[in-house]
Image: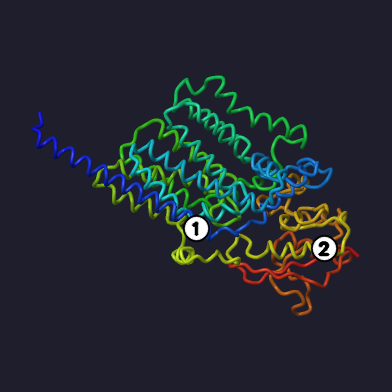
Amino acid sequence: MLFPVERSRLQEATSRRSNLDRIAEQVLLGFAALCFVVLTRHHWQQICDDAFITFRYANNIAAGLGPVWNRGEPVEGYSSPLWLGILVVGRMFGAGLPIFAGTLGVVGSALCLVTAHRFALDVAQSRVVAAAACAAASLVYPLYFWAPAGLETTWFAALVTFAAWSLIASSAWRWSLAAALLGVARPEGPLLVFALIVLARLAHGRTAWRPGFLGLALAPALAWLVFRRAFYGDWLPNTYYAKATGSLLFRLESGLIYALWALGLLAAVALASRLAGIADRKIRCALVFLTVALGAVVVAGGDWMWHGRMLLPVLPSLVALAVASIARAPVRRRLVLALTCALAGSGFLPRASLLANAFAGLPLPQTSYQEGTMVSAAFAAARFIAARYPPDALLAVNHAGALPYALPNPALDMTGLSDRHIAREVEGSLHHKFDATYVLARKPRLVVLNTRIRPGTVGVWYHAGYWAGETALVARPEFSAAYRPVEIFWEWHWQAVPDNFIVLFERI
């Protein structure tokens, strides 16, 4: 029994602690909001050439041609049916796709932070810890780089984060909504749906497998599978054949190198949760789901793009689980665990110079975009082509993004993303597939090439070495006999290779 004075002191201490927690929560959430606004503004103009592939499909759908790359040539060269559908809605309402997609990407980044906050709150049962997790996740650099890029990246990341959270949430229905959207969000989506079905049963018991939940989880993926088979004639998307086939050993090696930082963070988080004494079955299921998502990236061979594009989906959840585990660990272990997780996650933190420029209000330099200034150079080349060649002239291109998007012309994607023959019948993986004989047999009117040496240097217009597929094409005697250079080029710059040039060759 407490005396009145002791009770009063206890109430005062509790009130003081509550006020301090409230202030700490507000400060941490304010920090997260500040980072989000400043870093989003810094990266706002960054756009990726690959985004224009999906934009071209969206334009064709809006024009009544269907989800095709070229008129009358059904091939699934985009990565996300869900993202394509959203872009089509925006296009039909008159939205400019680059701005519309960039805005949606920023919304996706915000959803990642909100869901990471909820994830940490359910693990740690502390609003301060949840705010700390949100603040830590707000420093994940890929979250901002890929937001305005025009790709589905941040929305897929939000879905993966939501799916991981659904496994530890109190209600059992959220996993089915996450699965329904994941099934049509990326080529690896059906794998994640299967993992969610199994893990939801382990996390939530029999309740998770109600017929309604299972039906919602499976319906979109199955419906799209039926449509793909009927319309495209395939069970898997063309992008799968273009990227994730070839030598398994080569893909595993490339994937492990690409995912090294994320694998380190996953190991650090698993260690932190174990040392924190977290034995909750639901949390373990969430960690297994994130492992499956990361494993799919490794098996697919990673990605050629920098800035952790394919790794971003697992990062918000891993950061949230790391912060929550550190908070639940014994006091004597917290510092070691915090340092371990911070070191493992340092590969995804923004550089000090980038933070300085961002908080100074400076935009990201164009040379630091994913392809530098190539997109603007591609648009300039497209204007030249549109003014001098008919709209039915076939173009053969390596970077099959902004340039084909800006033109009505049919385009031959020499990397195979939007070409059935190269994707399926040529050995290799990622961007190692090409077929010079096939390209020449198609007799394109124009061939768009890239070089890193100024055209005309030492009397040579095209200098080999940019991409093996282009080099092999130009090296063929048939190419020299059938094509001549158009004496104009477009210069573009990139932080990795300062000087690059777009050149044209036309069929004689």
Q: Write down the residue under mark 1.
A: 39
The residue at the far right in this view is 508
Point out residue 26 in the picture as x, y percentages from the top left corner. Answer: 36, 48
Query: Which type of secondary structure does the marked residue at label 2 adopt?
Result: helix
Q: Write down the residue under mark 2.
A: 385
Q: Amino acid at mark 2?
A: Ile
Q: Quadrant of residue 476?
A: bottom right
Question: Left or right: 33 with respect to 405?
Answer: left
Separation of residues labelled 2 and 1 (CA atoms): 37 Å
Q: What residue sits 73% from the left and 55% below the top?
A: 400
Q: What residue sits 77% from the left and 48% below the top?
A: 419
Point out residue 228 in the picture as x, y percentages from the top left corner. Answer: 73, 35
Quick one: quadrant of the C terminus? bottom right
Question: Left or right: 269 with respect to 218?
Answer: left
Dot 2 surroundings within 10 Å: few (below 14), some, or many (20 or more)? some
- What number is the disc on residue 287? none
- Is 53 drawn above or below residue 188 in the view shown? below
Instruction: Name which of mark 2 and mark 1 comes first in the sequence.
Output: 1
- Is 505 drawn above or below residue 305 in the view shown? below
Q: Are marks 2 and 1 in contact (CB under 8 Å)?
A: no
Q: Nearer the viewer, residue 190 or 129?
A: 129
Q: Nearer the viewer, residue 29 or 295?
A: 29
Q: Nearer the viewer, residue 169 or 128?
A: 128
Query: Which type of secondary structure does the marked residue at label 1 adopt?
Result: helix
Q: Amino acid at mark 1?
A: Leu
Point out residue 381 in the picture as x, y percentages from the top left corner. Answer: 77, 64
Q: Nearer the viewer, mark 2 or mark 1?
A: 1
- Is 229 drawn above or below residue 42 in the view shown? above
Point out residue 208 in the picture as x, y percentages from the top left corner. Answer: 49, 24
